[in-house]
Image (cartoon, rainbow, N blue to C red):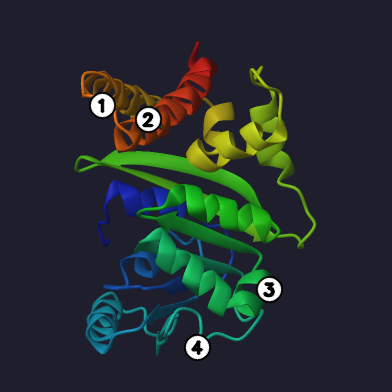
Amino acid sequence: MVKISNRLTTAAALVTQGYTLADVGTDHGYIPIYLLQQEKIPSAIAMDINEGPLERAKEHIALYGLQAYIQTRLSDGVAALEPGEVEAVLIAGMGGGLVIHILKDGEKVCQSAKELILQPQSEIEHVREFLREKGYTILAEDMVYEDGKFYPMMKVQYQGENVKMALEKSSVAELDLSTGENVEVSKLSDLYGGLLLQNRHPVLKTFLEKEKLIYTDIKENLEKQPASEKIQARLAEVEDILHYNELALQFYV
């Protein structure tokens, strides 16, 4: 049996039982191999933009005797996929900007999938905001802490340009926000994940506590500096972060 990290195991757990899978940026091909061995998926397409990782994936697939179940394709994002060809698309281990780029360039493919499993390594707020604005609903979220880093991940589904993120909004709306404005609800959801907050995810709590300590320290240091336009602007940014951090931590009270 192939061994994969807790981060990848958690992402793999979001894939729906019995769905065919496309693994974008497959690298070594470990997630499709793992899911086949767990008998969670019937088949997969392992894709990567570079020949080197794809060759390594082919070697690992052959090592575990899964050539009949896992195809490999050289692909920039989901360019080598046809709309509806697979039911689940997994995009993990890359920056949020690249995730958004793949979703934009492969719009038809991504919208046709029954689910997308996303694990952006950065810019998570921008990814969630993009999903919300483009008609994707977040169906499930999880988060792990591994090797000193926090990894949020999510299962999403396209439901149309005009759809509201009902799960996200309803979960965050349970919090008594000071303003009661939708913009605050959406912002809080984009920053931290509405379902993570609703479920009071323990790893998110750890993240929030660390964030509070870091930015409280930054705020105190800024307040000791001679007043200037630059300092005031940065102080306002930090206070804004701490404001949303406080709202999020109220879920754990």
Q: Earlier in the sequence, mark 2 or mark 1?
A: 1
Amino acid type at mark 2: Val
Q: Is residue 190 left or right of residue 7?
A: right
Q: Are marks 2 and 1 in contact (CB under 8 Å)?
A: yes
Which residue ends up furthest to the right in the rendered image? 162
Which residue ends up furthest to the top in the rendered image? 253
Q: Is residue 65 left or right of residue 17?
A: left
Report the residue at 21% width, 22% height from top: 221
Label 4's element? loop
Q: Tell me if I can see residue 36 in this picture.
A: no
From the top left corner, tell me how far across and down residue 50 is, in percent.
Answer: 29, 85
Disc 3 and disc 4: Cα gap in Å?
14 Å
Q: Quadrant of the N terminus?
A: bottom left
Report the residue at 66% width, 31% height from top: 171
From the top left corner, tell me how far across and down residue 208 is, in percent.
Answer: 38, 27
- Residue identifier under label 2: 238
- Residue identifier under label 4: 80
Amino acid type at mark 3: Ser
Disc 3 and disc 2: Cα gap in Å?
40 Å
Q: Earlier in the sequence, mark 3 or mark 1?
A: 3
- Residue identifier under label 1: 218
Q: Earlier in the sequence, mark 1 or mark 4?
A: 4
From the top left corner, tell me how far across and down residue 174 is, in percent.
Answer: 68, 22
